Image: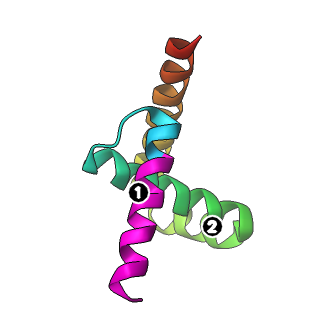
């Protein structure tokens, strides 16, 4: 992947993070990126996500916490806009 595409994808992720949770700090972008990747895999290849969950139960719990954190941040952002 070339640098230009990397930069453009980073910009896309930054905007997505901003629209999703209202902030774009680097650590938040990283969390949203992990959440988006996991969510996509879980929807497109559920058996793979299940295998990963079974293989790494500690990571599964961390991912569940991350998903809950992003959901809460999204709900808080939405309630502020009303």
The local crowd at label 2, few if under 14, some if 14 to 19, many if 20 or more residues have their Cα within 10 Å, is some
Instruction: Say if residue 57 shows up in the picture.
Output: no
Q: Quadrant of residue 28?
A: top left
- Across and down, in percent, residue 47 comes to 70, 71
In magenta stretch: residue 40: no
- Across and down, in percent, residue 53 comes to 54, 61
Q: Quadrant of residue 54?
A: bottom right
Residue at x 53%, y 32% (from the top left corner): 71
Residue at x 44%, y 40% (from the top left corner): 18
**Type of colouring:** rainbow
Q: Secondary structure at mark 2?
A: helix
Above/below status of 74 relative to 58: above
| Image quarter of the N terminus | bottom left
Number of residue marks: 2
- Across and down, in percent, residue 80 comes to 49, 13
How far separated are the C-alphas under marks 2 and 1? 15 Å
Q: Which label is found at residue 41? A: 2
Q: Which label is found at residue 59? A: 1
Residue at x 40%, y 48% (from the top left corner): 62
Main secondary structure along the magenta-highlighted residues: helix
Residue at x 61%, y 56% (from the top left corner): 39
Q: Earlier in the sequence, mark 2 or mark 1?
A: 2
Instruction: Say if residue 68 shows up in the picture.
Output: yes
Q: Secondary structure at mark 1?
A: helix
| Image quarter of the C terminus | top right
Which callout, 2 or 1, points to the residue nearer the camera?
Answer: 2
For residue 44, side relative to residue 38 (left or right): right
For residue 59, side relative to residue 55 (left or right): left
Residue furthest left as drawn:
26
For residue 37, side relative to residue 27 (left or right): right
- Across and down, in percent, residue 78 comes to 56, 21
Part of the protein shown in magenta: 1-16
């Amino acid at each position: 992947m070339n640098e230009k595409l990397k930069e453009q994808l980073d910009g896309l992720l930054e905007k997505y993070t901003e629209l999703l949770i209202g902030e774009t700090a680097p650590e938040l972008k990283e969390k949203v990126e992990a959440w988006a990747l996991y969510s996509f895999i879980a929807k497109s290849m559920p058996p793979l996500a299940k295998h990963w969950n079974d293989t790494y139960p500690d990571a599964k719990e961390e991912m569940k916490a991350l998903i809950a954190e992003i959901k809460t941040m999204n709900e808080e952002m939405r309630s502020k806009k009303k």
